[in-house]
Amino acid sequence: MENEFTTVGKRVVRSDSLAKVTGEACYTADIKLPGMLAAKVLRSPYPHAKILRIDLKRALKVPGVKAAISGFDTYGIKWGVFRYTKDHPMLPTDKVRYIGEDVAAVAAVDEETALEALSHIRVDYEPLPAVFDPEEAMQEGAPQIHKEFTNNINIHVNIDVGKVDEAMNKAFLVREDTFKAAGEAYAMKEPYAVVASYKNGFLDLWMPNAGPHVRAKALSNLLKMPLNRVRIRHINSGGAFGGRSEVSPGDLIASFLSIKAGRPVKLVLSREENATSTRQVHDIIATVKTGMKKDGTIVAKDYRAVYDGGAYSSTGPIATSIPFYVYEECYRFRNVRYNGYRVFTNKGIRGMYGCHGRAFLAGNEAQMDFMAKELGMDPVEIRLKNGLTSGEVTATKSKITSCGLKETIQKASEKTGFKKKWARTQRFKGIGMGCVAMMCGFPMGFRSGSSCYVKMNEDGQVTLVTGVIDNGQGNESLAIQVASEVLGVPMEDINLVNADTEATNLDPGSYSQASTFVGANAVKVACENARRKIVAIAAQKLGVKEADIGLKDRMAYSRKTPDNKMRISWAAREAFFRGEPIVGTGSFFPKIDFEREWVSRPWGQMAGTFSFGTSVAEVAIDSETGKVSIPHFTAAHDCGRPINPMAVEGQMEGSIQQAGVATIMEGNLWEGGFLLNPDLLEYKVPLACDMPDIETIIVSSRDPEGPFGAKEGGLTIRMNAHSAVACAVSNATGTVFRELPLTPDRVLNALQRKKGVKR
Amino acid sequence: MILPKFEYKSAENIAKAIAFYERYNGKIRYLAGGTDLIPLVKLRLSTPMAIIDLKEIEGLKAISHQGGWLVIGANVTLFELKNNNTVKEYFPALYESLDATSCETLQMRGTIGGNILQNTRCLLYNQSLEWRTARGFCFKMGGETCNVVPNARACFSNYCSDNALSLMALSASVKLVGPRGERKMPLEKIFSGDGRNPFTLMPGEILTEILIPMKRSKGAYEKLRVRDSIDYPLLGVGVSTKGNAGRVCVGGIGPSPLVYNLKDINESAFKDVAEKAYSDARPVSNTTLSPDYRKKMVSVLIQRASKKALQEGK
Ligand SMILES: Cc1cc2nc3c(=O)[nH]c(=O)nc-3n(C[C@@H](O)[C@@H](O)[C@H](O)COP(=O)(O)OP(=O)(O)OC[C@H]3O[C@@H](n4cnc5c(N)ncnc54)[C@H](O)[C@@H]3O)c2cc1C
Ligand code: SF4
């Protein structure tokens, strides 16, 4: 892609790639500190039980054990993302609410000793009746998991816009379907790990996280320590996908153990613990009722979605809302009602997920295809007809400033010959399309903005300081690339200091798709401020106007007479002479409606901008076994201007695996409160051999506010790839899917169901 | 998850291995590639006092032709066997099952002996000690019940070797050497039918050789799995025919495979077996896919494998 820039828009090698592919990159479990202890956690064997007593005495007597704690050793402060969701004690003292919940912990000289000590902790429980199904949990008389939440209803999001019933009555075509989906596992490569080191009244922590500043604040509250004494340090992260946004019990446990033992403590969870006891993804039941005009215009939508939230609130209000929003940010709904319920059950805690809401989103899209067919339309036409365009306002009053939805639909369908393939419906072959929009950031109060500090050193090299964090998406490289562009020095000349609460400023973190739109914008502003100082000196020295100065390849030069040039490092030294070094700060704060609240006021501007995308899956079904394969997958993404197209494509490809191919295999399996597949053998993450041929198409609308016109890269595909696959399978079987994942047994049933209908 | 403590001994020959067995009063496990054993030890499903490594025993690493048999040492890796020309040319069913075993990385480590003697599996069994303690021990762990089928008297764990099925279809035999001497028997005789203790091997016995009659065969192996690599079979079917004789073996359901001798080599003979196997198969709810579905697939996969076997060479 040619453009006027030196590095922006170019396929550059990410700054973190080399260390990661050579194994040099350091992760939390790699950290070794002098005197460091190993921690282990004792977990609840009951889905629901009263804690009568916890006795640590015998564990403390095991030689080599340096500290042991239970909830009785903490301040008993409950964690919650919102004021109204503070329900998670981290180490409970009243009762346990799921199998695998943290109950007590020890720190010892090594892992073996710690394990041995765990077996000497005595906990007396009184088992209580438990409930595992959210619909049952909502019934009167079901076991109550939290007394503050009647009928286990944790969150109820109610949105009601226009006149739904009236419009539905007048609609030409109405259809209602119910869709179910099993919750997924995040299956990050890196099981959760924390290192805590308490020294001289300061607590340093390392862990994979999606926002160091919010983590530090939460911990300072839970530990009753001043914020400046809790420091989250930079470390590489082996994946988050939405599952590492909040403070976790492990953070608190490692911290308390380190404080007690006076030595650094490392806690590394097993694969099983990572699956049962960190975060899981919501199981969902979504009922979708849609009314359409004869011409395919959606006139009314009526939703009821039930989210199995597990034992605690976590990011509940957000999780209960997001599937609805990413859909209403994509299509025009004049009359829409959404009742989203997040319900407590005695299962692991459910968090936000990069592919969150597949029953709801894929359900909507598959239903739309079948309604279109009844009206003599196809999926492309109906999506173009109802899709939002630039300048429009969503049902809940968010203005769309830049929108390439239409282009993504057109390009993806042209590339795949969609219309023809969809109409032909070869036996046991199918094609399907999924669309969605994605908010780039959402309201998080004063944490919604980001700030950056940059300085140029005497040799013209640069130090960039930003709160932006990287969970594997390439955010660090992105920040460096933006700075490189603005300052005219190559990426390798830029050292990044990031995601370290001691050194960096507030940043929204990497869970609301704000890293590019907000974080990189702040980097750009800071670098522009520094650039101005370089330009002023260079203009003086070269005897040209400031407007004539360009910066490139470590040189400042006159654009009119490029031979008239000097090293940028000279400008840096000159600046030191003048006592005014080249430094700059910059911030970016998105234009969001801060009155907006997930439950109490669900309307107003959600984000500074929105990205868009269309996925198209082509599937083939083995008619005898029901096994689905996905030979081709095409994704078109409006990410604004791609800063690094290769990184955006990587995100799109990852999304196709994690959301798209996962649609035919991934799902947590339960027996009551027992997770049956807390491993990577029986939890089926798609393998290389299961992957389709992938075609990625970047549609670059230029966002007026985004850094160099950029928005968000990849998550849009993560939120619609499941729809494409579910629609394609529905297209192939001739019947709307009912439940995800689309494992062979379910698909075979669908084929037989269809046969039954046709006779 | 860390391993518990155990002694590690490497044996240079069979006699030394058996001597170690005796020295540790039988509280040992033999180790080949370790791909089955080590996960079991990590989960505390096996807690040997000592692990006796057989990998250094030269005699167990060879493939040879002896008096009308292909003789395969127990320590030959799956990968080596897969790339053996005789296997490719003579035993297509075995070639296909080897190729379908997990992934190539595992095939390079896992041995054919270990593959045959791998423990049976169950979603409620292959779990950590903490998980199983919370759930309560079942028959196979020394408990009083089956956690999958309430009130059952037996364990329904699944035998998941792909290659034992094709080997039995090829009428393979095995040679065992133990403290009480040496014996040879048809492969199907090593299965006890009891999921708690699936093999009839006597304490301390070592599997030394697998012997396949050297006769060109036609055949195929069909495997049901969710992902196209790594996954164990949810059902496996090996079919092999030589002249007018042939066998169909069904595994991945229950602790011992089903073996059927074909009366004739034609479509209807296969159909009869498919029907018989369908009614014999008793899958229970202990894998990631439903028992009904796995049962249905028994006849589908037999028909598929038989079609391939019949077509071949035409
Ligand atoms: C992720 C994964 C996926 C897998 N998928 C498949 C699959 O798809 N299909 C399949 O068939 N298998 C599969 N397996 C099982 C795999 O362990 C075997 O295929 C492998 O061949 C075992 O060989 P090994 O040498 O590693 O056995 P080991 O683990 O060394 O031994 C297995 C058992 O046999 C005993 N043993 C080994 N050699 C001898 C001997 N000579 N005499 C007496 N006892 C002996 C050991 O004590 C142990 O009990 C999978 C395993 C894993 C970990
Ligand atoms: S089938 Fe029953 S007895 Fe056998 S391992 Fe599974 S739960 Fe245990």
Image (cartoon, rainbow, N blue to C red):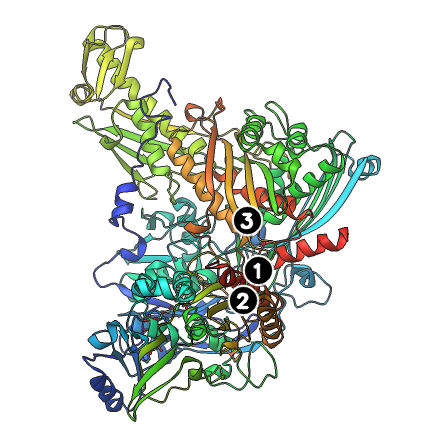
Chain bearing tag 1 is A
Tell me the amino acid under the disc marked 3: Phe
Tell me the amino acid under the disc marked 2: Tyr
Q: Residue A574 placed where, x, y %?
A: 17, 19
According to the image, label 2 marks what residue? A98
* Badge 1 density bin: few <14, some 14–19, many ≥20, Cα 10 Å: many
According to the image, label 1 marks what residue? A310
Q: CA distance from mark 3 to mark 2?
A: 22 Å
**Total label count?**
3
Mark 3 element type:
loop
Q: Is residue B197 left or right of residue A486?
A: right
- Residue at horizontal 20 percent and vertical 20 percent from the top: A568
**Of the residues under marks 1 and 3, which one precedes in the sequence?**
3
Task: Choose between A374 and B169: the one closer to the eye.
Answer: B169
Chain bearing tag 2 is A
- Residue at horizontal 68 percent and vertical 47 percent from the top: A736
Q: Quadrant of residue B304?
A: bottom right
Please state which of the two labelled residues, at mark 3 or mark 2, is closer to the viewer.
2
